[in-house]
Image (cartoon, coloured by chain):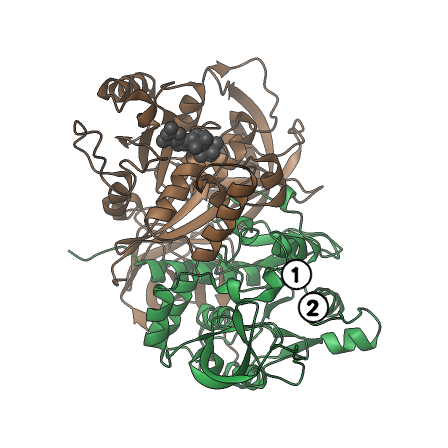
Amino acid sequence: MLDKNQLLRFTTAGSVDDGKSTLIGRLLYDSKSIFEDQLQAIENTSKKKGHDGVDLALFTDGLRDEREQGITIDVAYRYFTTPKRKFIIADTPGHIQYTRNMVTGASTANAAIILVDARHGVIEQTKRHSFIASLLQIPHVIVCINKMDLVDYAEESYNRVIDQFEEFSSKMLVKDVRFIPISALNGDNVVNRSENMDWYQGAPLLHTLETMHISSDINKVDTRFPVQTVLRPQSDEHRDYRGYAGRVASGIIRVGDEITALPSGFTSKIKSIDTFDKTLEEAYAPMSVSITLEDDIDIGRGDMIVRTKNQPETSQDIEVMLCWLNNSPAKPRAKYTIKHTSNDQKAMIKEVIYKYDINTLDRNKVDKDLKMNDISKVKIRTTKPLMVDPYRENRTTGSIILIDDATNETVAAGMII
Amino acid sequence: MRKYYLNYLDELESEAIFVLREVWAQFDNPVILFSGGKDSIVVAHLAKKAFYPSKIPFPLMHVDTGHNFPETIKFRDDTIKELGVQLIVGSVQESIDQGRVAEEQGKNATRNALQITTLLDAIEYNKIDCAIGGGRRDEEKARAKERFFSHRDDFGQWDPKNQRPELWNIFNGKHFEGEHFRAFPISNWTEMDVWNYIKRENIAIPSLYFAHEREVVWRQESWIPNSEYLVLEDHEEIVTKKIRFRTLGDITITGGIESDADTLEKIADEVSGMRKTERGNRSDDKRSESAMEDRKRQGYF
Ligand SMILES: Nc1nc2c(ncn2[C@@H]2O[C@H](COP(=O)(O)OP(=O)(O)O)[C@@H](O)[C@H]2O)c(=O)[nH]1
């Protein structure tokens, strides 16, 4: 692999039986990422179950319960590499009761593949999946119109889906949408160009994934450096070293930059940017580095180093699009631990403004209970200020999770508005 | 114009360093589980980078089955010296002597499953609240669903159906007294990524990974090394072959492959052309379709 090869993370969504497992199996198989012993295992299982041929869908079956029930219930990660890129697939189930898994898979994705059955066209699930993709600001969406073999590879079926999709998605914030007609089962337009669809001029799926421009997906304007921990070596050689360790969330940091430490507001200049291998002149997202400053100011975990001229909002009151992830519903006015970058605080959900009806995408202002898989707009108050950016501008400094102190479970995930 | 993006290996490295620093910030008493295998060597290397110019601020822990390759133990001790960190050893032999576990019987007996008890005892005894492992999601299907921060109850058990959702890069390491976490900084790496990284960073690894002449016996479709623990069947025969190992586990169960790859370059080339998974040579994983999942639920690495 070449030095410049990038990593692309994508998620897949579709209703049950739209062919998601088959598609992933096909991508892995045709890109030669399935090993012989794995293939052998699924051949054996296919035979045992009486399927003709190898059921590529079996390849993505994970845990035992799922194998027995024949469904995917959690997020599973798959990997494959081509000469152009390394790929990470977050494979998430499509049922309505698993909205939370799709949200999880979408949170780190550069791209989303949304599957539509060519025979059925856009259905409610498709709308829901697209909604989640737009809510989580996945930069690229690829709508794969699958099972084209069952509609005689007809262009009308493809065009129908595009029309339907564009009609409902105009209200959503998806920047880059593409449509590809495929047959996951036969491999048309997955890795290899289909010979059955001359009318389609675009690229097959894999080529699209390999060449899609992703380096501008990261915010390079607003410099944000959440401090994870402070490095203070105990050796004679580095006695006076005081490095702020963290990963650049966004923007570019340069030696000599005038910075402000938040929330304290103390100012200084970047003295050095260090890594084990070398000291750097500049660092950018998502690099992990250690920063030293010209002045000795008090900074610790949870603080954020930013350029003095470009600061996030500092606030105790935030509005958030919240997805409830836990079996037990939110308790009214209960306190939670909120985690935002490297910062932990206590927080309270002060008000539910509205809840989305996930089927119709209407806003419900009457039923305001927050139950598992609900997505709602809420107001949160924290005990101390957070340094936040809108999620649509910054996925790292714009995201939070809530933890229930009684169980320590992660109960909600939120996107700051 | 300058490029402002990382290549895939740099991105994986940066992610792993981020995870290691989160572990250090969120836990009181973490350790790195160090087996002397390539994955844990890579994790230790990443930890060295994550905390530089400080030393790695926590110990390495080895769960010693007693059935080691001698080369692995020497390598472990050299690594400890080089990094200047403390080593904690959990001994399976001691667990057996104390009657905590019983040795498996029969030809294919291994101490693999016994490690679970020793590992959990060592975690409890040393009050460890986070054990950092070199597990990768591409290794095996039960591992594909592991979180970066993986919760274990007070019996050390993993509940794969009830895992905490993990979004963005926000890790929830909150736990109650007696519970602990496993953290997997190289979750998103594949075997190929590991080799490319070892090659790029020129990381020292045990000689066992390089092709060498060794006495072996053909068993369960791989070359099992001769050792004092090997019990030969009638039809089996010890031969000398040029082999190397793709993974390192107990000497009793780790199968080698025939190979001429005696440099990192050649190994990386060989791995990129491999048509079988690395765990295919581990008889511990061949016992049943869900062998790994069953062990992991109980507290395995
Ligand atoms: N004819 C045809 N059948 C397909 C295609 N893709 C998937 N299928 C079939 O549709 C069924 C459901 O596919 P599967 O991948 O398990 O769907 P999932 O539930 O979305 O993972 C299986 O019987 C597949 O063989 C396709 O492109 N054409």
Q: Is residue A384 visible?
A: no
Front residue of A124/B260: it is B260
Which residue is identified by label 2?
B115
Write down the chain letter for disc 2: B
Q: Could you tell me which residue is drawn at 39 percent across and 64 percent down?
A: B274
In the image, taking residue A64 as reference, residue B11 lies left or right, namely left
Q: Position of residue A64 (x, y in %)?
A: 62, 44
Q: Could you tell me which residue is drawn at 20 percent across and 34 percent down?
A: A195
Vertical arrangement, residue A245 with respect to residue A44, above or below: below
Total labels drawn: 2
Identify which amino acid the numbered label 1 is placed on: Tyr
Identify by letter the chain in brown. A
Rendered shade, chain B:
green
For label 1, the crowd category at 10 Å Cα-Cα, with few meaning under 14, some 14 to 19 and many 20 or more, is many
Vertical arrangement, residue A158 with respect to residue A80, above or below: above
Badge number at residue B300: 1
Q: Position of residue A191 (x, y in %)?
A: 28, 43
For label 2, the crowd category at 10 Å Cα-Cα, with few meaning under 14, some 14 to 19 and many 20 or more, is many
Marks 2 & 1, CB-CB < 8 Å contact:
yes
In the image, taking residue B136 as reference, residue B112 lies left or right, namely right
Identify which amino acid the numbered label 2 is placed on: Gln
The secondary element bearing badge 2 is classed as: helix
